[in-house]
Amino acid sequence: MSAVRIKKGDTVRVIAGKDKGKEGKVIAINAKNHTAVVEGVNMVTKHAKPSAANQQGGILHQEAPIDISNIMYVVDGKTTKIGYEFKDGKKVRVAKATGKVIVDKKGGN
C-alpha cells in the first residue's frame, strides 16, 4: 500500500463513488485503514440511544470514512497529485499539476 499524501485540513474532491464530484475538507485520516473522513461526503444515518452525552437520542446524520484512492487533492479548483521536493533543506509537498508548494494549515511547510 502506498503512503498517504493527503493530510487533515486539505481540500479534496471525490473522484469515484456515489458522491463523485463533491468537494470538502478532510476531517480525519486513518493511515492504517487507508481511509479519510471528508466534510459533507459519504453521509450515513445512525440511530443513537439517549445517553448522558446525547440526551435526546434519535437519528443522526454523519460522515463515514471513504477510501483515500477515491479522493484527490484540489489546488486552484483543479485536482492534482501530490509529490515531494526538498526546498531550503526541508521536505515539502508539491502539487504536480501546478508545481506550487502546498502550505499546511498548521503553519508548517
Image (cartoon, helix red, strand yellow):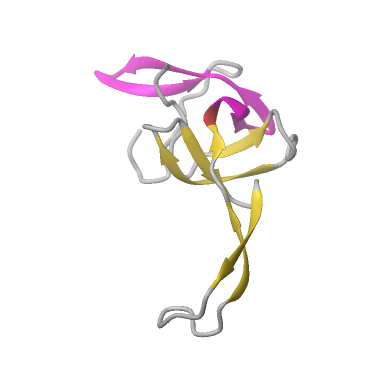
The relative height of residue 78 versus residue 58 in the rendered view (above or below) is: above
Q: Nearer the viewer, residue 66 or 108?
A: 66
The quadrant of the rendering that contains the C terminus is top left
Residue found at x 60% / y 36%:
12
Left or right of 90 on screen, residue 102: right
Residue found at x 66% / y 52%:
43
The quadrant of the rendering that contains the N terminus is top left
Left or right of 56 on screen, residue 89: left
Query: Is residue 28 shown to the viewer in this render?
Result: yes
Residue 73 horizontal/vertical position (percent): 57, 30
Residue found at x 50% / y 39%:
36
* Figure disc tally: 0
Residue 99 horizontal/vertical position (percent): 53, 17
| Residue 78 belongs to magenta span | yes
Majority secondary structure of magenta residues: strand
The relative height of residue 28 versus residue 46 in the rendered view (above or below) is: above
| Residue 22, image quadrant | top right
Q: Nearer the viewer, residue 101 or 11?
A: 11
The relative height of residue 46 versus residue 98 in the rendered view (above or below) is: below
Query: Is residue 8 shown to the viewer in this render?
Result: no
Left or right of 100 on screen, residue 2: left
Residue 6 horizontal/vertical position (percent): 47, 31
Residue 64 horizontal/vertical position (percent): 57, 48
- The residues colored magenta run 69-95
The relative height of residue 30 versus residue 50 in the rendered view (above or below) is: above
